[in-house]
Image: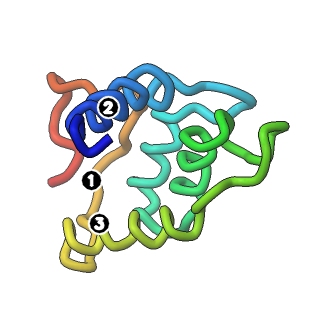
Amino acid sequence: SSEYKELKWVAGMFYWMESVQPYNEGGWKYSDELAKFVEGGMQGTSFIDAVSGIVNRGCHNPPCGTGALDGGQERSTNFKKVLDTMFAGSPPEVSGSIISSQVGNPSSPSLFS
């Protein structure tokens, strides 16, 4: 409903915190895969494709019994646009290794130098 636009965002953030960030199924753990994606220079689509599967179908490797991924190509394209905008087309260099316990921990040292 256009009357409650904020509710969509609040519900989306809640879903992200409750379902995506703690995801750890079938050998695919969100925090570890995020660290690998960042350490790998934020290249490729496998990370966003897996996250899209979690959001859209409940698993990191659709169709997983619930059907084909809907809008995957659009999500991948939009994700790349966001990264290109945030980093002016050049992701920052990562110094050191990011361990999963640091991901999402505000008391952790900076991930980037």
Where residue 46 appears, as percent x and y from the top left, is 60, 59
Mark 3 or 1, which is nearer the eye?
3
Residues at marks 1 and 2, CA–CA distance in whole angstroms: 29 Å
| 92 to the left or right of 64 | left
Q: Quadrant of residue 81?
A: bottom left
Q: Is residue 74 above or below residue 6?
A: below
* Residue carrying label 1: 95
Residue, x 15% and y 22% (percent of image)? 107
Within-10-Å neighbours for mark 3: few <14, some 14–19, many 20+: few
Residue, x 23% and y 35% (percent of image)? 4
Where residue 62 appears, as percent x and y from the top left, is 75, 47
- Per the image, label 2 sits on a secondary structure element best described as helix
In what quadrant of the picture does the N terminus appear?
top left
Residue type beneath disc 1: Ser
Where residue 96 appears, as percent x and y from the top left, is 31, 47
Q: Nearer the viewer, residue 32 or 17?
A: 17
Residue, x 24% and y 65% (percent of image)? 92
* Residue carrying label 3: 82
Q: Sequence-wise, which precedes: disc 1 or disc 2? A: 2
In what quadrant of the picture does the C terminus appear?
bottom left
Residues at marks 3 and 1, CA–CA distance in whole angstroms: 22 Å
Where residue 66 appears, as percent x and y from the top left, is 78, 38
* Residue carrying label 2: 13
Res 102 seen here: no
- Per the image, label 3 sits on a secondary structure element best described as helix
Q: Quadrant of residue 6?
A: top left
Within-10-Å neighbours for mark 2: few <14, some 14–19, many 20+: few
